[in-house]
Amino acid sequence: MAADDILHLEPHGVDTYVGSGPRYPWGGLYGGQIIAQALRAASMSLGDEVRHPHSLRAYFIRPGDHTEPVRYEVDRLRNGRSFSTRRVMARQAIGAILNLEASFTGPAEGTSISRQPMPDVVGPEAAVDDSWSDLFDRRVVEGEPGRGEAHAWLRFRRPVSGDQAAALAFLSDDVPTDAVRSLLISPEETKEQFESVWFMVSLDHTVWFHEPSDAHDWHLYTFSCDRVVGSRGLTAGRVFARDGRHVATVAQEVLIRHRRS
């Protein structure tokens, strides 16, 4: 699948759209793909309104199957003077695979303040190429095991047509599990050894969009995991443009399980 196809949806009745995605290297559909298309479906239901997403919250219900299309059903919860709210259910033959709610608003005047500066890490040219997809570049800033931190530079390799907020949402699902692994892994373990014992999947995902951004440019995705309890790890992160602007905030809870022998 080309980068400009990842957000492509075909209308299939009123407020219903159909999309598809490539196979995730670890099997099934990449969660960021489903989130991005669900957000795109919600945006398409706005019609001619000039409103952009300021937040989304999604729950992963079942793994997606890359061999069949995904049906996105949009519920228009509210069209207000300042905000529009949408719910999107993503379905396949097995049933619902994702539930997403998104809120949209128009341009507004106001103060722009950011308390957290971009971390002082090496740029993408000096980071480690750890790309797993031909859709986007992934350059990882190697960190210390046990700190629960993960930093990665991400950008799409080829043009993505349509909604840049949805494109950012696509990439935002890539780094959170790295922060969980960073907290749990021991200094004596390699990444491969850790992943041979444990597997992790996303449970829910939240994004707050602060400023417009272009997913074709390098952005630093910086995450930390401060809490693991039972089989769940909570991560929080920020997305910075290369010029230091804090363009989005992300939170995700991750399920951690022993692999079956």
Image (cartoon, grey):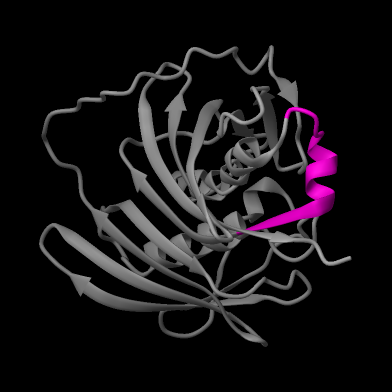
Q: Is residue 210 left or right of residue 136?
A: left
Quadrant of the image occupied by residue 26 = bottom right
> How many numbered dots are placed on residues in this image?
0
Q: Is residue 253 left or right of residue 137?
A: left
In the image, what residue occupies the spot 58% across and 63% down? 34
In the image, what residue occupies the spot 63% across and 55% down? 6
Residue 11, given in percent of the width and then of the height, sits at 52, 76
Residue 234, given in percent of the width and then of the height, sits at 48, 50
Quadrant of the image occupied by residue 155 = top right
Q: Is residue 88 left or right of residue 81?
A: right
**In front: 185, or 40?**
185
Residue 157, given in percent of the width and then of the height, sits at 68, 34
Quadrant of the image occupied by residue 116 = top left
**In front: 255, or 40?**
255
In the image, what residue occupies the spot 55% across and 60% down? 230
- In the rendered image, the quadrant that contains the N terminus is bottom right
The correct choice, above or below, for 42 with respect to 222 in the image is: below
* Residue that extends furthest to the right in the rendered view of this protein: 261
The correct choice, above or below, for 125 with respect to 46 in the image is: above
Residue range of the region highlighted in magenta in the rendering: 187-201
Magenta stretch encompasses residue 156? no
- In the rendered image, the quadrant that contains the C terminus is bottom right
Q: Is residue 129 left or right of residue 246?
A: right
Residue 190, given in percent of the width and then of the height, sits at 82, 34
